[in-house]
Image: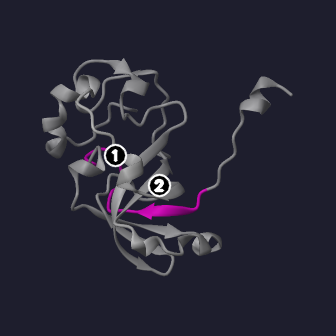
Amino acid sequence: MSAEARDQIVLRSVGVVRSRFTEATGMPIQTAGAPEETGRVEVHPEFVPGLRDIEGFDYLILITRLHACENEKLEVVPFLDDSSHGVFATRAPARPNRLGLSIVRLTAVEGRILHFSGNDMMDGTPVLDIKPYVPRFDVRETERVGWFSARLERLPDTRSDDRMR
């Protein structure tokens, strides 16, 4: 088996994000920076049985494919900074596998539609997985957040631009 065949991973989307954002420029860069921004996930019909009991959660973790990001970069100037960093020390979308992670607040479930707030995703974004957010599993208290510590106050007012193209 070739190294390329061994490393190939095939994923399928379980749904798609519907959002008012149709281009990357001007979008929120994190869900925490846009807690009132709404969106929805349209789950594909064959995955609807997987939604059973989801209404019991306040927050969901959406794993997505950053489909509109065309570039792969290993060093980037992230939206919250003016200096270059290794991509794995950022949340930048221009990454090798272009995977996104968004923690959203579930506001309603209507059949196969999940309504949420805290949107930082573009319309048409493929959703690869949906996981319940459970604070006991997911929250870690820390003050050590690298270069972000000097930039977090900028989050509510920072929007994406074209630097990841």
The answer, for residue 102, to whether it is visible in the render is no
Q: For this rendering, which residue is in front, 54 or 95?
A: 54
Specify the quadrant of the image occupied by residue 89.
top left
* In this rendering, position of residue 33 left or right of residue 121: left
| Dot 2 amino acid type | Thr
Taking the spot 39% from the left edge, 47% from the top edge, the residue there is 138
The secondary structure type at the circle numbered 2 is loop
> In the rendering, at what x and y percent does residue 14 appear?
58, 61
Q: Is the magenta stretch mostly helix, strand or loop?
A: loop
Residue 125's disc is: 2
Q: Earlier in the sequence, mark 2 or mark 1?
A: 2
Q: How many marks?
A: 2
> In the rendering, at what x and y percent does residue 110 appear?
43, 81
- Range of residues picked out in magenta: 13-27
* In this rendering, position of residue 123 left or right of residue 150: right
| Dot 1 amino acid type | Val
User: Against 19, is 49 above or below?
Assistant: below
> In the rendering, at what x and y percent does residue 91 appear?
36, 35
Query: Residue beneath label 1, please?
Result: 139
* In this rendering, position of residue 138 left or right of residue 156: right
Q: For this rendering, which residue is in front, 135 or 34?
A: 135
Q: Residue furthest bottom?
A: 111
* In this rendering, position of residue 160 left or right of residue 157: right
Q: How crowded is mark 2: few (under 14 residues within 10 Å), some or many (20 or more)?
A: many
Specify the quadrant of the image occupied by residue 155.
top left
Query: What is the quadrant of the C terminus in the image?
Result: top left
